[in-house]
Image: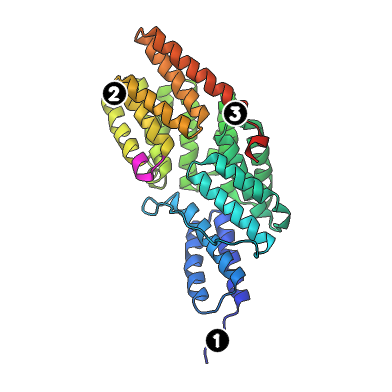
Amino acid sequence: MERTISSEKVGAKIVEWYSCLISKSYEQAILLKNEVKQLISSIDPNDKLTAYYSLVDFKHNILVSRYNKNKCSQKIDPFDEITKIDDMLKYLYYFVSGQYEFTQERYLSAVKMFRKAERLLEYVNDEAEEAEFYQYNGLVYYRLNQYLVASSYIEQAKLIFDRLQYKEPSINCQIVLAGIHQELKNTEKGEKILKEALGQAIDIPIVYAQVLRTLGLNKQAQQKYAEAEIYFKQALEYPEHKDTIFGVKTSYSLANALFKQNKIEEALHHFQLAKAGAAYYQNKEYGARCLFMEGIYIENNFDLIDQAITDLEKERMDFEVGELAEEAAQFAEKEGKTKLALKYMKVAHDARLYQNTLGVDQFV
């Protein structure tokens, strides 16, 4: 006689699967996903269970695809009608939708989804899930250059992750906090945090490499390009990093550091890797950055530089616009093109001004 599998058992397995995603135990999450898929096919699930399964599956695809080059995230709608679903599932719907928007670089849309989720946060009775919510809010505000808001969320997340002994998420929070210090020109504090994180991440290759990359960015911000080059190359020695979108970003940063040192041939190699990777992942920011790099270091073509800045402006990436416009201004000045230098300095000034006028109330 075939043993009956209850919907409660399937639901418990989905909870276990979801917990693995939060703790970044991706190998275990993949095993549980396959197990849940088999279990759910053997029962007649109710609407609530189907919705829960769909949302966790969607979340799984978003998170795991970030590290798997052969599985790029594809948009799916977990369910069209959520008014009849309970508040916990409504929260999860908005939160997972916000995560998807974040991975697609639509940061303002992500904030709107997270704000809707936050109104339902009281229905979340799991500390790890609450911490992940704070972490993603911190990440999106960091990307929007709202550093005080970002650090507040990230510190809340880290506090909970540390209490739960979730090592990898906690280190990821340290990386973001270091990045915030770097953007605020406190590179020494950022480097101290990263050195501590490096020691903690020694047994987690993908995180260890990410810390190395961030140390490289820290040195690059100080215009210590030779030291940045070393860190970037060390990060790319790890396949877990190299064969992901993060490896694409590191290849771009390495190319930039090499161009700055006039190591043209080696820089071109890493530029081509970054350009191909940005196209593969359809990453708008790094697609624009590579176009900019091509214009400024390879073709000496200001039309390409202008197009790259325009592409970033369309995506409301104001910090990136300011960063590249400043670099273009310095380049134009060296070329003796004073009018162009002034033009790009104005673009940079306007971008910096605009990013600092954005507030939380504008995202509601």
* Lateral position of residue 264 relative to residue 46, left or right: left
Residue tagged 2: 298
- Cα separation between marks 3 and 2: 32 Å
Q: What element carries label 3?
A: helix
Q: What element carries label 1?
A: loop
Look at the image and tell me whether residue 318 can be seen. Answer: yes
Q: Mark 3 points at which residue?
A: 181
Task: Report which residue position mark 1 lands on.
Answer: 3
Nearer-N-terminus badge (3/2): 3
Which of the two discs, 3 and 2, sits closer to the camera?
A: 2
Q: What stretch is highlighted in magenta?
A: 278-283
Residue 196 at x, y percent in the picture: 58, 36
Q: Does residue 263 appear in this view? A: no
**Overall secondary structure of the magenta stretch?**
helix
Residue in the picture at 57% in, 34% down:
144
- Three-letter code for the amino acid on which mark 3 is drawn: His
Labels 3 & 2 near each other (Cβ < 8 A): no
In the rendered image, residue 146, in percent from the top left (x then y), is placed at: 61, 32
